[in-house]
Every structure is written in C-alpha cells, then in structure tokens.
Image (tube, rainbow, N blue to C red):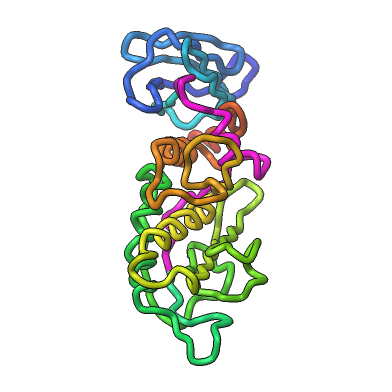
Amino acid sequence: MSQDGGAVVALQGRVVDHDTRAALARVRVTGGGATTWTDQAGRFSLTVAPEAELSFSGTGYYDRVTAVEGFAATYSLVPRSFDMTAFNDVARDHSAGTLRWTSAPDIYVDVRGHSFAPGQNVAAAWVDQAAALAPGFVTSWTGGTLSVGSVTVGSAPPPAGTPGVIVIAFDEDPAHYPNATAAGSAIASWDTQGVIRSATVRLRFSHLTGEAATFSRQAVIGHELGHALGLAHMDGGVPSMMAAIIRTPELTVFDRAAGRLLYDRRPGNRADDRESGAGLRSITTLASR
C-alpha cells in the first residue's frame, strides 16, 4: 500500500534492444513520479501504482511510454536507426494509432467466382496458391507473433465480418477495387481499441493468368494480406511491399522490421512509441494468469 492508502506494485522489469534483444544499461525508467535506471543486465526495480504509465529513455533509442505490463515484464526499445517516419506512414497514419490482430486468424479461401463471366471459373492454381501462401505471409507480416489457426478451402465461407477470420475471395466486380488495373483489395474491421476482428481480401486475377504471372499473383496476395493485418500503403520512397505499385513478391527488410514492431506493441500505438493501456487490471487478476 502507498502512504495515501492506494495500492502499489513492485516491478522487476528488464529493458532490451527491440532488434537484437540485447540488454540495455543506463536506461532511465520513470513511473508514477519515481525514477530509476537499468543496470548492466538491463534490469530495474520500481514501485508504482497498478495503473501507472512507464516511460523509458535511453541514448540512441526512441523514447517509449507504455502501461505497466506485469510484475516481471520485458520492455523493448527501438533503435533510432529504424525509420520511424516510414513506420508512421505504413502503420499509423491511416488511423489514430496502429491496428493489429491480437489472436491468430483463420483463413478461408472461397473457391466461388464472384461476378465472373458466364462459364468462367476460378482457376485451381489461384486457389492453391492463395491457400499455400497465406500462412507464411501472416507469420512474416507479424514478426512471427501470429500463426494462422487453420486454412479452409471451400464454397461456404462464414458471413462477412465473422470474428477471427480472413476470407480470401476471387472477385471480378470493379466496384470492389480502387481502379481498373488493381488486382486486389482488402478491408479489415477493428474495434475502438485498434484490435482487428475480421478481414476480407479480394483478388482480381483475370489479367494475371498462367505460370508467367505466378510471382505477380504472389505479390498481390502478400500485399493485400498486409492490409488485412493492419498496414496501409507506403507513400514514401522506402522499399516496401506495401508501396502502391507492387514491385516485389517477398517482404522487404523494412517490411519485416515494421511487422515485428507493429505486432510487438499493443494496438493503438502512437508516434513515436507511445501506447496506453489498462495497466494491471488488478493484482489478483494478474497473479492468477
């Protein structure tokens, strides 16, 4: 208990480099009016209220502000060598904060052709490719945080907006695409906290047919799944699969770094590296986890 009768918790935390996970010494840690510094092993002790925010400041790193995460949590800091302006572009500027899934989504690949010409069917190669690539892209875009729960191929997808599902559909309706040349689109639904609940990816592959277009289709699938996982188009010059004009079928170095950061933080993370949260909901609740 604090002197004024309020509850306090004793934290035994650790601070590491976001990229290398190496311990960071001499990081200033502040919370609830108290201040300390990490030791050579990156560890610190601090007594704060359960709802307190913690601030971290270290030379060569972006400051971080976050809610208390646990009695013995590890907190990572992002090196200033990381292009945070580009990260803002791809992960923050489209909303009040970052958007992300907090649980592994299931994938449903719909084999029906939507708005196809009479007699035209979805190519089996398109279905096979989407089903095969989707799990890897989800894992890559989330820095290994999430793995797909299941992959289902069929003609009876769950209703649009079903929580926990990314539906991949083959759709030739031009109304679902931003322009005449777009080969894909995606829409995600999220709650007020920035947690993505469901998503639909639409693929228009009528002009990406045959083996010669295999890598182009792969690029479109990866790009649209990036949208489904919380990323927007890149407007700047940083090489990224999320550029409006897709130039690569694989995630770039920046893409992977951006995905790791996005999925290493709470939904709603704001620039430069600030997030709010409920803190420790209660000592009893946290201790029982």
Would you place residue 151 above or below residue 75 in this image? below
Residue 123: horizontal and vertical position, in percent? Answer: 39, 79
Residue at x 43% of width, y 26% of height: 75
Q: Quadrant of the N terminus?
A: top right
Quarter assignment of residue 187: bottom right
Would you place residue 130 above or below residue 196 in this image? below
Look at the magenta stretch and give its main secondary structure: loop
Quarter assignment of residue 109: bottom left
User: Which one is nearer the viewer's eye here, 85 or 192?
Assistant: 85
Q: Quadrant of the C terminus?
A: top left
User: Which one is nearer the viewer's eye here, 137 or 189?
Assistant: 137
Quarter assignment of residue 94: top right
Residue at x 54% of width, y 91% of height: 118
Residue at x 66% of width, y 49% of height: 192
Residue 259: horizontal and vertical position, in percent? Answer: 45, 41
Q: Is residue 122 magenta?
A: no
- Residue 41 is at least partly visible in this image: yes
Left/right placement of residue 145 relative to residue 181 reads: left
- Residue 284 is at least partly visible in this image: no
Q: Give the residues in magenta.
A: 78-107
Left/right placement of residue 114 relative to residue 248 reads: right
